[in-house]
């Protein structure tokens, strides 16, 4: 499929989306709270159908640890000359991670460098309810 | 300011934020509609305190042309080795662009290549109400 900007878009399968998420570590989290629409950058890790990120206990993102049922997460890639790229969006519900084994694993293996533990840090999970994405090529 | 991941964050001034937005063309738009939280990638242009993007008349983004008072827009940069980057977030209200001169200017000059006009296309503006951002350096 092409559009008037002479780009072609290819829909990605759900698994292709999850695989692409594994190739990057920066994304955006979108949700509405009492202050309104939030859109915050995060360093994230993907494990199966879940997105994980670490935040400080006093940040806006920490509220997601109390459980939010409509959170969107997006990650994108585009190369320097914008000739190609992809974007993936996940929508789901958030929660706080309390499992010590999972926390240890994430802290030890998250890229680009291990997440150093902070005493007041909270790890948030977004459980995937929907995932989709596209590859983009400019012509 | 550094955090436990050994990154340093520098807050950007509003004008630094707008200047950085001018160096990239891909961002994400977040808003809530009747279906829930939306988070969509766009090719955008910045002019002064406004963000512009083009969308097809039947897309979810076209609803923003009817006026939405709580829309967030985010753009990020991070280099291949994640040693440095920046992120900028704008929050504001959206509207449809009907000014023919402005439409012509955007279609002719938007990067990375001119937005070819499509008959059913709508150009949306986000009027900035708040803008903020940070530079990030990993150590």
Image (cartoon, coloured by chain):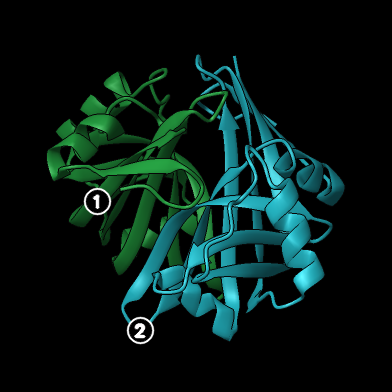
Chain colours: A cyan, B green
State the residue at coordinates (53%, 30%): B82
Q: Is residue A51 above or below residue B7?
A: below
Per the image, the residue denoted by label 1 is: B132
| Crowding at mark 1 (Cα within 10 Å: few <14, some 14-19, many 20+) | some
Residue A36 x/y as whole percent = 34, 75
On screen, residue A90 versus residue B98, left or right, reads right
Per the image, the residue denoted by label 2 is: A34
Q: Nearer the viewer, residue A92 or A135?
A: A92
Residue A59 x/y as whole percent = 40, 69
Residue B48 x/y as whole percent = 13, 38
Q: Is residue B4 above or below residue A121?
A: above
| In contact (CB < 8 Å): disc 2 and disc 1 | no
State the residue at coordinates (81%, 42%): A19
| Crowding at mark 2 (Cα within 10 Å: few <14, some 14-19, many 20+) | few
- Residue A112 found in image quarter: top right
On screen, residue B51 versus residue B14, left or right, reads right
In three-dimensional space, the C-alpha distance between marks 2 and 1, rounded to whole angstroms, equals 19 Å
- Residue A98 found in image quarter: bottom right
Q: Is residue B92 above or below residue A2?
A: below
State the residue at coordinates (43%, 53%): B29
State the residue at coordinates (13%, 38%): B15
Chain that bears disc 2:
A
């Amino acid at each position: 499929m092409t559009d008037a900007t002479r780009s072609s878009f290819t829909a990605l399968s759900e698994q292709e989306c999850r695989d692409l998420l594994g190739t990057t570590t920066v994304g955006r989290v979108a949700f509405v709270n009492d202050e309104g629409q939030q859109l915050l950058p995060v360093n994230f890790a993907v494990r199966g159908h879940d997105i994980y990120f670490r935040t400080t206990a006093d940040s806006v993102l920490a509220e997601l640890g109390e459980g939010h049922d409509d959170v969107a997460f997006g990650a994108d890639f585009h190369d320097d000359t914008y000739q190609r790229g992809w974007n993936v969006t996940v929508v789901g519900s958030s929660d706080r991670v309390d499992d010590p084994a999972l926390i240890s694993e994430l802290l030890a293996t998250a890229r680009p460098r291990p997440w150093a533990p902070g005493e007041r840090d909270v790890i948030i999970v977004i459980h995937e309810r929907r995932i989709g994405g596209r590859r983009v090529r400019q012509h």
